[in-house]
Amino acid sequence: MLFVLILFSAGCLFAQAPDSVAGRAAFESHCMVCHGSDGNGGEHAPSVLPAVAAKTDAELNAIIVDGVAAKGMPGFKQLPEAERVALVDYMRVLQQHERRRRGFQSTRLKVKLTDGTQMEGLAISKTRRDLALRTADQRLQLLRKAPGDTHRRVTSQADWTSMHGGLDGNR
Ligand code: HEC
């Protein structure tokens, strides 16, 4: 489970790679007005994300060029190919963000421990039995549900997620 989380956070760093900047700019100037800033739907059009998940790059490119006349989406024939490619890449980034967001949203939690103390931190993962909290000292605390709405400490370790970020920042 932790490994998956580490991969996810590595993915976040990549998602901010420079090439997505061009795609983002293009999306914001041509598409956001209808599809919303995160592609998830706006006042004038629904989310593009299901189509992005279901279609190939070539199909998405064709939608950008031709539009969806029957439903009121204009074609963008004038856009240079490089910009269309960047747009398709950027929509894939948006779609991945959305998937991650739906999978798990980290929130701040305060829980009661079996020894009567309390622990507060950012919930990194949560299942029916287990909870991983990142506490202010940057340690990852693994807790297991115990009776009476309490949690029992399982292990505590240096938080590889944030170490990863730290190493990256030092490059
Ligand atoms: C004037 C509003 C408008 C603008 C601007 C617009 N769209 Fe759309 N778009 C729509 C509508 C309306 C639909 C049809 C939704 C539906 O199927 O009901 C749509 C559908 C889509 C779909 C899904 C098509 C399918 O077959 O399901 C994609 C992908 C898409 N738009 C991408 C884009 C991109 C990329 C841009 C910017 C280059 C853009 N749109 C700009 C209104 C717009």
Image (cartoon, helix red, strand yellow):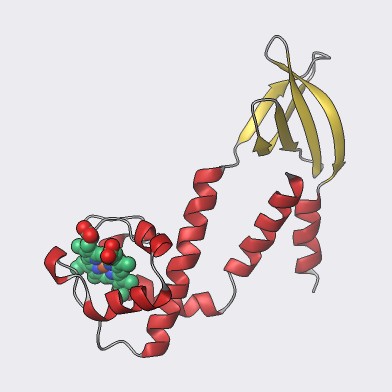
Q: Position of residue 84 (x, y in %)?
A: 38, 82
Tell me: 131 left or right of 58. Answer: right
Q: Horizontal placement of 141 versus 91: left or right?
A: right
Q: In this view, does 166 lie above or below 83?
A: above
* Residue 28 image-quadrant placement: bottom left
Left or right for 56, reference 45: right
Q: Is residue 94 above or below residue 131?
A: below
Residue 156 location in percent, x, y? 86, 36
Q: The C terminus is located in which quarter?
A: bottom right
Q: Which residue is drawn at 47% across and 53% down?
A: 98
- Nearest the eye: 88 or 13: 88
State which quarter of the image contains the N terminus.
top right
Labels in figure, total = 0
| Res 44 visible | no
Image coords of residue 19 (percent x, y): 54, 80
- Residue 92 position in % (x across, y down): 47, 66
Residue lying at the far top in this picture: please name it. 148
User: Where in the image, quadrant-wise, is ligand 1 located?
Assistant: bottom left
Position of 131 relative to 40 (above/below): above
As drawn, 31 above or below 149 = below
Residue at 80% over, 18% down: 117
Residue located farthest toward the left when viewing the structure as drawn: 70
Q: In this orientation, which residue lies closer to the viewer: 58 or 166?
A: 58
| Residue found 54% across the figure and 44% down from its top | 103
The reply to whether residue 52 is visible in this rendering is yes
